[in-house]
Image (cartoon, grey):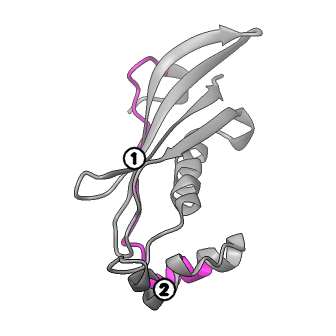
Amino acid sequence: MTTIDTVQVGTELPPLRIGAISRSTLALFAGASGDHNPMHIDIDVAKSAGLDDVFAHGMLSMAYLGRLLTNWVPQQSIRSYGVRFAAITPVHGEPTATGTVVSIDEVDGERRATVELAVTLADGTVTLTGDALVALP
């Protein structure tokens, strides 16, 4: 296993596998985030929009990527973090958050890694991509 001290280009962060997204998860996230958009919690509203069912908040997947990063480095080491939403995460979807170091640079006397990030469902659908800049020891 690679330690944070031996990070190099190509280093993969330990994946964060999330269990199936339940309706309870969506309801709890709606309450915690203040995002009560009915598309995420009301099946009738989702069906009226032509969907089969509700789907997860994009920010929930972003939070999982944040957890992936803070499982790897302390929160104060994250210099920037951004994402792009690519597809919806359906209820019962099983996302996995991953990250790969794509570059390492010296900036203002600090060693920093650029990490390419993604959230992927079990069927291979990429729902979120992004990157983070992380200070290394």
Look at the image and give the residue range highlighted in magenta.
7-28
Residue at 42%, 73% (x, y): give it: 21
**Amino acid tagged 1:** Pro
Q: Horizontal placement of 121 versus 136: left or right?
A: left
**Callout 1 crowding tier (Cα within 10 Å): few <14, some 14–19, many ≥20:** some
Badge 2 is on which residue?
45
Residue 128 image point, x, y percent: 45, 48
Residue at 59%, 49% (x, y): give it: 66
Question: Can you say which quadrant of the picture contains the N terminus?
Answer: top left
Residue 129: in magenta span:
no
User: Tag 1 or tag 2, which sits nearer the N-term?
Assistant: 1
Residue 48 image point, x, y percent: 42, 85
Question: Can you say which quadrant of the picture contains the C terminus?
Answer: top right
Q: Horizontal placement of 51 versus 129: left or right?
A: left
Residue at 46%, 25% (x, y): give it: 101
Please name the predominant secondary structure of the magenta segment in the image: loop
Q: Is residue 120 above or below residue 117?
A: below
Could you tell me how many numbered marks the image carries? 2
Q: Is residue 116 above or below residue 16?
A: above
Badge 1 is on which residue?
15
Q: CA distance from mark 2 to mark 1?
A: 34 Å
